[in-house]
Image (cartoon, grey):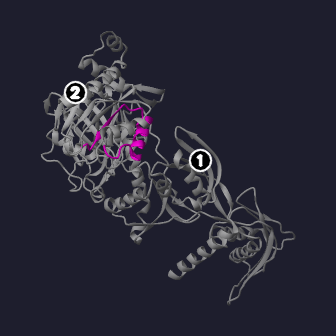
Amino acid sequence: MKEYHTESIRNVALASHSSSGKTMLGEAFLHFTGVTTRLGKIEDGTTISDFDEEEHRRGISLYSSVIPIEYRDHKINLLDTPGYTDFVGEVISAMRVADSVVILVDSVAGLEVGTELAWQHADQFKLPRFVVINKMERENANFQKALATVQDYSEVRLVPVQLPWGEKQAFQGIIDLLTMKAYKGDGKTTLDIPADYRDAAETAHLALMEAAAEGEDSLLEKYLENGELSANEIIQGLRAAVRHSTVVPVFTAAGGAEIGLAPLLDAIIDLLPSPADVGVALAQSKDGSEELPAVDNGPLATYVWKTTADPFVGKQTYFRIYSGLMSSDSRIWNQTKGVEERFGSLQIPRGKENISVKMLHSGDIGTVAKLSETATSNTLCDKTHPLTLPVPTYPTALYQVAILPKTQADSTKISPTLTRLCEEDMTLSWHMEPSTNQTILQGMGDQHIDVAIRRAETKFQVSLTTAEPKVPYTEAITKKAQAMYRHKKQTGGSGQFGEVWLRVEPNTEGEFEIVNDIFGGAISNSYIPAIEKGIRNVMKEGIIAGYPIRGVRVSVYDGKEHPVDSKPIAFEIAGREAFKLAFKDANPVLYEPIMDVKIIVPETNMGDILGDLNTRRARVQGMETERGHSTISAQVPLAEMLRYTTQLRSMTGGRGIFTMQIARYEIVPAFLKDEIVSARQKELANRKAEE
């Protein structure tokens, strides 16, 4: 592959709902430009962009992949993104390094939830965009109906640049409103517009001309004077309108049938911005904020948007150059990690294939293998000119599972494996939950977690299983109580003796406090730490249901010791047992975490959501409605929210989202407490029997 300078590069994300034809459109472009000799198929696992084994198994895209297309002496870096909601992190990472986005819409289904989400992320990144009404060869395809569903959703005006030449099985090409020509098949054959399409084309051409005229003041003046613009002037005005996001051009195609390819590629080059057109990137330097135009002679600033582990070639690092020039066999400074990395051969990715190059120019996307420290979202730069590029905001993962090893050998590898998985995917995270002693993995949904578990097995050779996470309940008391316990052990030789009298009461000020209230030296001060140790050990394990104890004040007020047999271990045991007895008499209760939850759903779903929240012991705090979406604020016990990600999607057709954070702990209702305690004691008994 030859070198391409900044002005000749287009970085374009393909985004939409799952199964709208992104992967097949990329495949058609590769075949059309001569990269492949035959069209790959998803069902056969022969597409360039879906090359992972798991993608072949599921028949959907799971990861963003780069497909460079060479056309008209330009390089178009197509970023094929997943459409399934669980893998939204891949979409965000791809859009972070794209300069524009092509949003595909299924000609039968119209606007779908995944397309809405893609549109919202494109808005967040302020990306110019095209809409492509795809799969026009399908039965029941309807260009105008599909277009109307998008226009109803979009705040920006949609303007067709093409009309379909036929629909369904009769779809044979496109009517191009820029050149006012008909393009048959893939677009290499040009014909006059058929007579029965001429009137519709003239009307649409006039609307396109008006939209283009509004792109630049000089063109608007000329249009108002003459009532006409040339094809080049329409392109000029439309280019400006697209870059300012005042107009969204609409195209039509059938990627799988290879229809409408050349005019769409022409439009990508003519209308979408190059990295040089986008303007400056902002980075943080030691002197504050710094503007970085996309030029080769600027300071090096490179953003790592994706990393993958490959058992054959090792770690692969995907990057986008925002400023400066990169060459093979060089040393680069990782500003995020504060380490220097040795670059080997620079490569251009094309699916799983990597094409070696000597140099990459500003604005381009490439990969490098075997960097030791670099992870996703890191900034690479010159050590003498340190810069940090901004990291996008990723949605908080709220779907949790407990991770368990399949074998003893796997248990030692859990921590490094989960860390590597989370370094690759910014929407994955993991932590240890001390109150339940579980390893918790958080992701965007069940499919996301399932893919991560399979990836751990195939890429890192670690076999893991999942279980539903336990709610981190805590145990506490609600009144004062007291107890004593005498530990006496005589088995020949030196014995053990310790007697402890103590009181317990709720401690609203903190987690735990122990006070020495002994008068007259009934117990030596040296034994108080042993008593405290025994109590603290019990607090970790719990008493009524095996959950940690919190909020207790203990007063040790009396006891006895033996001049020969008393030892710290005896008072540790006596303190532990006395605490258990007093705790059971102090009206023990379970506390559960209460979450602040904010749910955003389409207005039409609000009634169903409120009804469902009532079944979850929720307390609704407020409701707001804006632009067809309702926001519900509520406080809900965590126990009722463990699988809410899946349930909310089901109730809203995938359009509902929510955030959640802990607010406080509250006492579990009595009717639930007995059930939880019984289940927990049964679990602990089974575990003991297994041991």
Can the viewer see residue 493 in this picture? yes
Q: Which residue is mark 2?
A: 198
Is 461 on the left or on the right of 170, as rendered? right
Which of the 4 image quarters holds residue 255?
Answer: top left
Kind of residue sitting beneath label 2 = Arg
Q: Position of residue 286 (x, y in %)?
A: 47, 29
Q: CA distance from mark 1 to mark 2?
A: 51 Å
Is 102 on the left or on the right of 336, as rendered? left
Q: Secondary structure at mark 1?
A: strand
* Residue farthest front in this picture: 196
Above/below status of 151 relative to 241: below
Which of the 4 image quarters holds residue 340?
Answer: top left
Q: Quadrant of the N terminus?
A: top left
Mark number displayed over residue 632: 1
Decide which of 627, 457 is in the foreground and name it: 627
Q: Secondary structure at mark 2?
A: helix
Taking the spot 36% from the left edge, 20% from the top edge, the residue there is: 215
Q: Residues within 10 Å of mark 2 (few under 14, many from 20)?
A: some
Which of the 4 image quarters holds residue 355?
Answer: top left
Decide which of 199, 597 is in the foreground and name it: 199
Taking the spot 58% from the left edge, 61% from the top edge, the residue there is: 640
Magenta-colored span: 107-136
Observer-side mark, 1 or 2, equals 2
| C-beta proximity under 8 Å, tags 1 and 2 | no
Q: Position of residue 638 (x, y in %)?
A: 59, 59
Whether 52 is among the magenta residues is no
